Amino acid sequence: MSILGFRKSAAPAPKDAALAEFLQGFSIEVMPRTAEKVEDFATILPRGTRVYIAHIDGTPIDEMVATAARLRAEGMEPMPHFPARIILDRATLAEWIARYRDEADVTQALLLAGGVPEPAGEFAHSMQLLESEAFDGFSRLHVAGHPEGNRDIDPDGSVKNVSEALLWKQKFSERTDAEMAIATQFCFEAGPVIDWAKAIKAAGVNLPVHIGVAGPAKLQTLIKFAIACGVGPSLRVLQKRAMDVTKLLLPYEPTEFLSELAAHKAVTPDFNIASVHVFPLGGIKTSATWLKAHSKDEE
């Protein structure tokens, strides 16, 4: 209590140095409709932040390109999704790429199969997109990773086909000039992620991993998205939290999960998780506020 009778405000908690270092160069994801809720990305994200633009089936390409152009204008680095199964043919792919380049100066892309069961045209998986040569000249290409498997690829719950696909992409990375990395689905438990990262490295996959993480959100929201997106074993972290009455009404934050990964990276220099990719399931501004609170202070 001060001499004037006012309580002194508590000093802010010191930042976790390892976590702050781990968050350097983070990326985040938006959709055209969620981007509309942000007045100016430059006011909530560091300049040059890589912003993935999720392309959900049914989203007009006009909206995707307009979002990319806006992100570029506001100082961000747009990286649109190219979901193989919603692209009709090579002509459509070429048109999308040309528009992104001409209207938004896009040179980075995330290539993935896409979350629809049946292909709309001639592409069924990201390897066909890579082989098409349509992305020649791009500076960076990311591919999807699934630490808990992907039932679209391995319906039996194994990771056999997923692992074979990563090995193919590793070999492709060795013959392209583009920088490549693996961007993963969001996870909630550090131990299985560390084991998966070690396993793919031991299998010969040396691509850097950008680990997916859910940004702060209500627990019910996360459980809904986790089930819809096929997040498996680590869903138990959310279910356990839901059984704790003291935590049920509190928003989930990824602090503990990322701190464990950051601590592991701090003592394991060759750890292949190189960056963090945020899925802002509780809102872009909410995730941006959390990131700012835990990242290094801007100089």
Image (cartoon, helix red, strand yellow):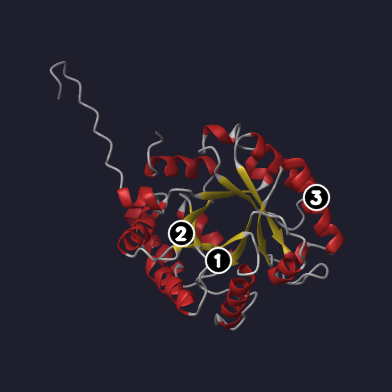
Which residue is depicted at the point 12% across and 17% down?
Answer: 3
Foreground mark, 1 or 2, reads: 2
Between the C-alphas of marks 1 and 2, the distance is 27 Å
**Which amino acid does the dot numbered 3 rest on?**
Ala
Position of residue 242 relative to residue 60, above or below, is: below
- Measured from the top left, where is residue 261 in percent x and y? 37, 61
Look at the numbered discs 3 and 1 and tell me whether their residues touch, using CB distance below 8 Å: no
Between the C-alphas of marks 2 and 3, the distance is 30 Å
**Which amino acid does the dot numbered 2 rest on?**
Ala
- Measured from the top left, where is residue 72 in percent x and y? 65, 39
- Measured from the top left, where is residue 34 in percent x and y? 63, 44
Label number found at residue 227 = 1
In this image, 216 relative to 61: left or right? left
How many discs mark residues in the rendered view? Answer: 3
Label number found at residue 98 = 3
In this image, 24 relative to 151: left or right? left
Between the C-alphas of marks 3 and 1, the distance is 36 Å
In this image, 91 relative to 148: left or right? right
